Amino acid sequence: MEKVYANMTGGGPVSVYVEDGRITRVRPLQVPEEDFPKPWVIKGSDGKSYSPPKAFRLSPPVHGERNRVYSEDRILYPMKRVDWDPNGERHPENRGISGYERISWEEAVKLVGSEIQRVQNTYGEAALTGMTSSHHNWGIVGYKLGPYHRFMHMLHYTPIYDNPDSWEGWHWGATHTYGFHWRLGMPEQFDLLEDALQNTEMIVFWSNDPDSTRGTYSGQESHIWRVWLKEKGVKCVFIDPLYNYTNAVMDGTWLPPRPGSDTALAMAIAYVWITEETYDKKYIARRTVGFEKFRDYILGDEDFPKTPEWAEEESGIPARKIRALAREWAKKRTCLSSGCRGGQGSACRTAYGTEWARMMVLLQAMQGYGKPGVSIWGTTMGAPASYKWFPGYAEPAGQMGRSDVAKNKICFSNPTKQRLFRLTLPDAILNGHDWFRGEGFCGATLEQQFTENNYPMETKVHMFYRYGGSFMGTMSDTSKWVKMYQSPELECVVNQDCWFSSETNMADIILPACTNFERNDLGEWATCGGYTTMAHIGNNWRVIVRQQKAIEPLGESKSDYEILRLIAAYLGREEEFTEGNTEDDWARLFFESSEIAKDGDITWEEFNRKGYYIVPCPEDRKSTPSMRWFYEEREADTPDPGNIPRKNGHPEKLGTYTGLIEFEAQSLLENLPDDKERPPVPHFIPSWEGYKSEMWYKYPLQMISPHPRFSFHTHYDKHESWLDEIPMHRIMKNGYPYWIVRINEKDAKARGLKDGDLAELYNDRGRVICCVSVTARVPAGTIHSYGCTAKYDPLEPGKADSVDRGGCVNLLTAGTLLSKNAPGMTPNSCLIEIRKWEGEC
Amino acid sequence: MARYSIAVDVSRCDGCGSCWIACKDEYCLNDHLPTSVQTPMMGQTWLTLKEIEQGENWKIKMDYIPVMCQHCENPKCAEGAPEGAVYKREDGIVIIDPVKAKGCKDLVDKCPYGVIYWNEQAQVAQKCTMCAHMLDNGEKTTRCVESCPTQAIFFGDLDDPNSPISKFIAERGGSDQFGPYRPEEGTKPRILYKELPQVFAAGEVLLADKKNDCCEGAKVVIKNVATGETRETATDFFGDFEFKFLTKGAEYEITCSYEGYKPQSVRMVLDRAKDLGQVVLEKA
């Protein structure tokens, strides 16, 4: 007998079909037509009415969730590393080499619990640290920021700050230009679909491939918007070293700059506008500060004029094309699409990526940012929607350790003051000390970015409780993670996950978690809340799902909440951890806290029975296009509850010191006036690892490794074997699915490489084997290989300098930060060489 | 009786692979008798996307063609097959009977589209059934069509003007705009495609005395030398022009002109998509 359950994923809502206790199929959430509320309608400037189809468009790999749930990579039993003896030799040097033995849950809980006690009693509470990866599952109750944070803060652990890894330059740079630090530097996106359909004449996609990165969690909901815009005749230009997938369908003009030259290109555009006086002078005068200093820098008062000819030399884009683009941009109502949420893109993850992100904001400021049709819009968010509040995992109100639904908001009472930082964690462990700036995600104030951290402050850490394990493929210079894991400083490493991932077999104890298809939860599609409030505007429909357990947990796996409850019980702290709540109790508490429940739109009982609720879009809603208020010199009317100036009684201001767009950033002038790498006025600074840098003469190929297309971060890759059959994702060679490196015909020929060859990508940091795709989609000198492989497969396991054949190109990228005071990652400033792989695999 | 088909607007397909994966989800390890038995987890891809990259320099185009069983009027796989092993239903769906076709491995190589797979365990040749079991169960769509985010692919009854496929075709200029994939195979496929990629010619016009600026608005005419057929366009603000949907192997003459300048013509055989590079016009 077939049963159907509702669930939610990081790429859309699904119906899960189950027969005899096994999932048979996973389809987009099946909703009868009469259950759809009235769709929104946008009147386009072409007179057409645009409305969404009554269907949900999932991220591609979500169609294969069944394959992922039953992956051979699932962790089914608790395990212990065979040569790790907590009462004797621990052999940290064998992490990544030695095998595992199955142990019972009772043993596992005792081992983890007693190690926590021993380490904290010996060194102090702060000697326990840990961190999670992101987004492998969906659901408010089960998500990492719920039970895991509640548990770890309860134990007073040393938290490890995340770095804003997908939008570094915007976080550390653009915030000082236009504020929005409460959005971590990414701009508002409200009602920009309507604005584009009504006003925009041209879209400049700059370092943006929304058909691949998909507005993060909204599946493929926005694809049809771009098709509408294309068929409506909106001109598209793509500035990207890769001829990307969005361009493939939008058929725009392709301008491929040398990686890392984007700032030069942007400055040359500003040069054309300044010298031809084709910028919005009224806006500059009334809505910005510091333009004169910027103008003087562009015109060359300090060094040389930033002419299109100069930018041609840096970027390889002919000066006449730069001039033509600048002129058209000034003439037409132009939307700048610089990253999938408006402010992201691989260009912001390059050396001094802060400068590019700041330039993106300043270019639009010169054209009247906020004017109808003149926006910074990723093309993936901004559908009309209801703004009723429903909790998201990334905001305190959606986290069981911070929300008012908890009696004890444990996460706020952790007395441990010291912090570690993800990007420099291996250095901190290996060197025994660390210094870094900032507080990870700096969403409260601009000043948070300037905080100085010294480690150790309380005690060095000796136990690492890792949840998930994807960093080999996602962080930079990642062979140092292997070295870190093999350090005797880490006396105990735990890894809790659903699947074996790239770091799992570096652990001493492995705990099997189940997926959100094997437990109950609830969640709204794409709603993360907090820094990206109202993220459901990336969807055509607002869908809230009661995530229903479809099958029993596989093997002996358990929900994360249950695993942590067992360990808490061992530590005698079960009541403190659970407050007597089951997972369903928490789910109901979160549901009842929402405006949807408080307004009586749907009862818990009905929601529970039906499995979903589609929130209607109010017919009388008022459109509030992002930044229009600022352009029109009004108070902010956008539904962003995080808006800090508004909270402080200044709704007419941006979040900068002056409340205006700052060509000369006052926050930088005041706090770090002598910083030459992120000066108050944005500067072009040649990369330490770029075109014609010292290293370029030895390693002349510039590699970019943007976010991937067929997986989300590392998720789905490796665990969803069906993806291995898609030759745009991996290429099967001798029965092994290799990661793809894309190389221009000229570069391939010079190295004797042809399509389908195995090749070794190398520099002084690492060696990775990939399968060659010879293509005109990258110009000569540029190499493309996606970041975020889930597979780390060293030919010599446990050796940090081993050749990898899983496709971990981040073994090659530099650990160097954006600049001294801007601690972001820079994987797209990477020089390599390639040669044919002649060895055995 | 319905006349089922699938229609694809290739210009809308961005190669996301949703259809490919959704198809795997429906058939791997799932029996749908009488129309199909379960396929193994790996090795069979009933629907694939053919990626076609064309062009050179910075004038590139990429297209994706979803390729599955074409449900031909004259299916090659049926030729010489045992009685009832391969049959065409009244609604047009071609089915390889998983019982009667047992052991017929030769079906795999008969298909000119390469979309039939051999199931070693079940000893049967397998391919797309247009989700016949779902349709027979009252559903109105196929898994591939259900999954498509850009509405590039539609399903339905060609004889019903209100079916999604009929509306889709009508909105796109009618059935004249659609045709089969690789008609030269002569099997009369049921699946319909619009804007299957063809070769293109692109280039840039420059004025000899104004090389620092792009030349917008230059007139460009292309003539098929054999047929005399001409098309005209103008350069965009980048000075670029392109002509899509040209005939591979045909000889073309491209003439660029701009007022006050001497026109220039280039002749070439389009054995592949070409970027002519810069066409520089001298002052008249």
Image (cartoon, grey):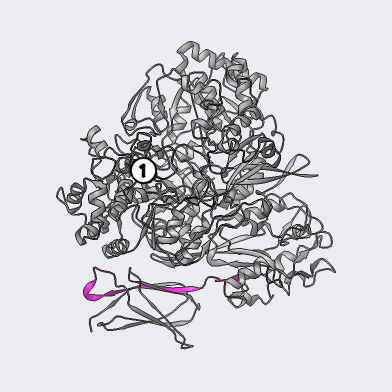
Q: In this view, does B274 lie to the left or right of A676?
A: right
- The residue under the point 63% across, 69% down is B167
B215 in the magenta segment: no
- Region in magenta: B193-214
Q: Is residue B194 above or below residue B118?
A: below
Q: Quadrant of residue A562?
A: top right
Q: In this view, does A481 lie to the left or right of A66?
A: left
Q: Is residue B263 above or below residue A325?
A: below
- In the picture as drawn, the residue positioned furthest to the top comes out as A121
Question: Of B255 and A681, which appears nearest the observer?
Answer: A681
Q: Is residue A458 above or below residue A722?
A: above
Q: Is residue A348 left or right of residue A98?
A: left
Residue A172 x, y percent position in the rendering = 34, 39
B212 in the magenta segment: yes
Name the chain letter of the residue that bears numbered label 1. A
Residue A20 x, y percent position in the rendering = 78, 41
- The residue under the point 77% across, 70% down is B78
Q: Name the residue under label 1.
A: A170
| The C terminus of chain B, quarter of image | bottom left
Label 1: element kind = helix
